[in-house]
Image (cartoon, grey):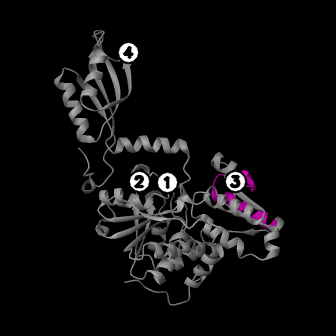
Amino acid sequence: MTMVPATRPDVTIEDIEQAAARIRGGVVETACTPSPGLSARYGADIWCKLEYQQVTGSFKERGARNAMLLMDGASRRRGVVAASAGNHALALAYHGRDLGMAVTVCMPKWAPLIKQERCAALGARVLLHGEDIAEARSRADECVAECGCTYINGFDDAPIIAGAGTIGLEIARQVPNADAIVVPIGGGGLIAGIAVAAQSALPATSVIGVEPKRAASWTAAAAAGEPVMAPLESTLADGLAVPRVGPRAFSIGRDLVQRVELVGEDDLSLAILRLVEEERGVVEGAGAAGLAAFIAGRLQDLRGKRVVLVLCGGNIDPSTLSRVIEHSLAGDGRLVQFTAMIRDRPGGLAHLASLIAQSGASVKQIMHDRTFAGADVSRVQVVCQIEVRHREHAEVLYGLLESNGIQVLTRSGASPTEAPNHADARRG
């Protein structure tokens, strides 16, 4: 049973309703659409809240605009500053330009060049400082001291949380009979705001959080009873890699969030691929976390229920997306690599290619290896990267090669990442 805090929370449903009115027309009211493909695959009635379709690619615009509009005239003239390597910085830069406010973003030195350039193109002053967000924050604090500008925390300020909560109000209108809303957790502001909105507008709806195992700061806070520093490792969901959840966000959300699930890197990677294929949407690792929980088999109790996934961001680097897709195709059993021994004479490679085509598979790459093929100069090893429909199809291919005198020496492929009971019924 959901516990209601005894004291008035920092952010109320009235704050969220006022934020919704305040930012209306300044941010996109994103669609929440049913996904027949994901629903069939995972056995739930899945709907997707398309926050990655905001102008700058993430939900962060809601809180940023709300916070800026709440500032008085003198504060607006002095401008705002934030420490961020990504979506929060972009949101402030975009809405600062729209509202005529100066914006400074302090980024770690490793911040992606594309995000540095986009913030600068939007008119923000970009300062690179330090090796992590904590060091970038120290530079932002210096800016506050120097010019009296306002620091806006990307996930723990009350106006930021209220802005994020407007997503919950929209979901209540768009999917009024939702059984659950699945929300990614980084600093905690998003899930805290949505939980407050859901408590009022959708009291029968569960709010479930999802974190990467490599950045489980909310889980650590829940275990300790308060926000604590959690160990961080590199994660595909870099937008969720916050070492400590916001104290305000945790205080608001801890009794309103039903549970939090953890997901691994392979789950996140495959979720990105699934969204590309089923939703024709490019979503970053953080935004795909809710679907990753389905893939990991962590949401079995939601089978047959109506579930909203909050796809909170889509700012993934193109080179990262390319690697993720290749890795996920291998993990999904649709991209395999093997080494085979064939005759090193005219027609040998053509025979191999013909058998691959006969099986219905597709050649992506073939490389000869004569150096390490052994003493028999009449034969050569070939390393083949092949696209197949699924793992069973690969086994058919291997059997066809062996039965036609082609020895398969080694096979490479990632282990299955998806829960076995979610196998794609459309295979054939």
Where residue 259 appears, as percent x and y from the top left, is: 40, 72
Residue shown at 31% from the left, 44% from the top = 415
The residue wearing badge 2 is: 271
Return the disc, 2 or 4, that comes first in the chain's sequence: 2
Hey, which residue is sitting farthest left in the picture?
403
Q: Position of residue 155 (x, y in %)?
A: 59, 68
Q: According to the image, label 3 marks what residue?
A: 119
Judging from the image, what secondary structure is the residue with disc 1 in?
loop
Q: Which of the marked residues, 1 or 3, is nearer the chain's N terminus? A: 3
Residue range in magenta is 120-145
Q: Is residue 332 above or below residue 94?
A: above
User: Are there few (<14), some (14-19), or many (20+) residues within 10 Å of tag 4?
Assistant: few
Q: Is residue 367 above or below residue 36?
A: above
Q: Quadrant of the N terminus?
A: bottom left
Q: CA distance from mark 1 to mark 4?
A: 43 Å
Report the amino acid beneath label 4.
Answer: Thr
Q: On the image, numbered disc 1 is attached to which residue?
A: 283
| Mark 3 surroundings within 10 Å by alpha-carbon count, few (fewer than 14), some (14 through 19), many (20 or more) | many
Could you tell which of marks 3 and 4 lies nearer the N-terminus?
3
